[in-house]
Image (tube, rainbow, N blue to C red):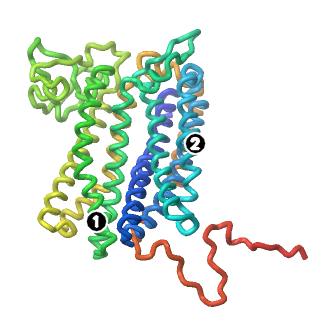
Amino acid sequence: MFGLTALELARIQFGFTVSFHIVFPAITIGLASYLAVLEGLWLWKKDVVYRDLYHFWSKIFAVNFAMGVVSGLVMAYQFGTNWSYFSAFAGSVTGPLLAYEVLTAFFLEAGFLGVMLFGWKRVGPGLHFVSTIMVALGTLISATWILASNSWMQTPQGHEIVDGVVVPVDWLAVIFNPSFPYRLVHMTVAAFLATALFVGASAAWQLRRGHDNPRVRTMFSMAMGMLMFVAPLQVAVGDLHGLNTLEHQPAKVAAMEGHWRNGPPGEGVPLVLFGWPDMQAEQTLYRVEIPRLGSLILTHSLDGQYPGLAEFAPEDRPNATIVFWSFRVMVGLGLLMLLLGAWAAWRRWRGRLYEGGAFLRFATWMGPAGVLAILAGWFTTEIGRQPWVVYGVMRTADAVSHHSAQVMGTTLAVFVVMYFAVFGIGLSYMLKLVAKGPQPGEDENPPQDPGQAPRPARPLSAGPDHVDPT
């Protein structure tokens, strides 16, 4: 298919499905915590604005959560269908970690989600608030186990290889592998950023349409406040993550920076702003660079050096062209987030946060920036790990199942059609809910005409309670 091998098609298929999936858990993590904050403020201040915002965003959370669960099931099956040799080799590590995620996080979310979504008038306010907190906690626990599994694939430790199979010997070392803390914090903060931008964009859009009311103002103010504090935090976390990656995966960092060779000792490494890494020529063409800045960022010294791609065997190098540009997309979007946060802080100080055409347009267009930055960062992380599926332990070519290119191409085409159809409808519905905006009395049922049967709260409730067998 298009001259691609079965291995390349299997990687594209998994990359396609994970790109769809990762969007939903990221927003779920952020929205769950946002809902917990809103309900806490409602219980504390008794301001109906927070109550209405809670019910508005809980509807969007429910749709997003459902799509995240469905899209996640597909990836789990792919470990067995497309990556069976990886599952046989490393399943003793990844299998239990994913099982722990189900037993702790998914069961916790499932147990309290019904109370959270349908129990507002059926349980006490304290129990309902606890349910919301438990769902938010469940999303964070889920992220912890998933990132523990993926981080072990990036920086594996705590295992031995016995008869060609990974055997865990120290579970604490497996879970708390060298990259796990940095990746967990980096991804969690990214989820909060993506949610803040999503909420802020929806509020900015409502303000541009003239829907200036306390509900819209409150969610816009909360989103911009979150962005103002979390965007700089993400820069600091990203710097620590980059230093950790340089220590454990230097080839990935070299690809990210488009760095091929060091100069004489004492000659700092420049920061390549733009260019085109050529894998065959082993150089970055059309370079636009700042002298010594690469050394300052990655070694915190003006004359420090780090390994270039040319120091690694050609078969051990990731695709620098893709990694170089996906990293710059992530960083560029991060700089725009910093700009929006600073602009919002300045306008808040001037008392003009809720006005200004250019500012509100910028906030609207930045709505998907958090999700796009997560995708770009994920591509950087996963493609930068290649050609290893478990870094330094198992190559990706040895992990793929023995399927033909025709089979992989056909299933990939089916996935593309089905995903755009199913999740396209789901995203369209979710965006329609967002476009409606928060309304007063979101939790109240509409009045019924005298003698009219109550409107069912759920589709199955529309059926008759009794059936006349005659």
| Left or right of 25 on screen, residue 360 | left
In the rendered image, is residue 432 in sight? no
Relative to 315, is 175 above or below? below
Mark 2 vs mark 1: which is more N-terminal?
2
Tag of residue 204: 1
Along the viewing direction, whichever of 374 and 445 lies nearer the viewer: 445
Residue on which disc 2 sits: 73
Q: Which x, y percent locates residue 192? A: 35, 49
Q: Quadrant of residue 212?
A: bottom left
Q: Residue at x 65, y 86 (%)?
A: 452
Q: How many marks?
A: 2
Q: Residue at x 37, y 46 (%)?
A: 191
Relative to 369, is 456 above or below? below
Q: Residues within 10 Å of mark 1 (few under 14, many from 20)?
A: many
Q: Which x, y percent locates residue 431? A: 43, 62
Q: In the rendered view of the protein, which quadrant contains the C terminus?
A: bottom right
SS at mark 1?
helix
- Outermost residue on the top side: it is 163
Q: Residue at x 46, y 52 (%)?
A: 133
| Left or right of 38 on screen, residue 321 | left
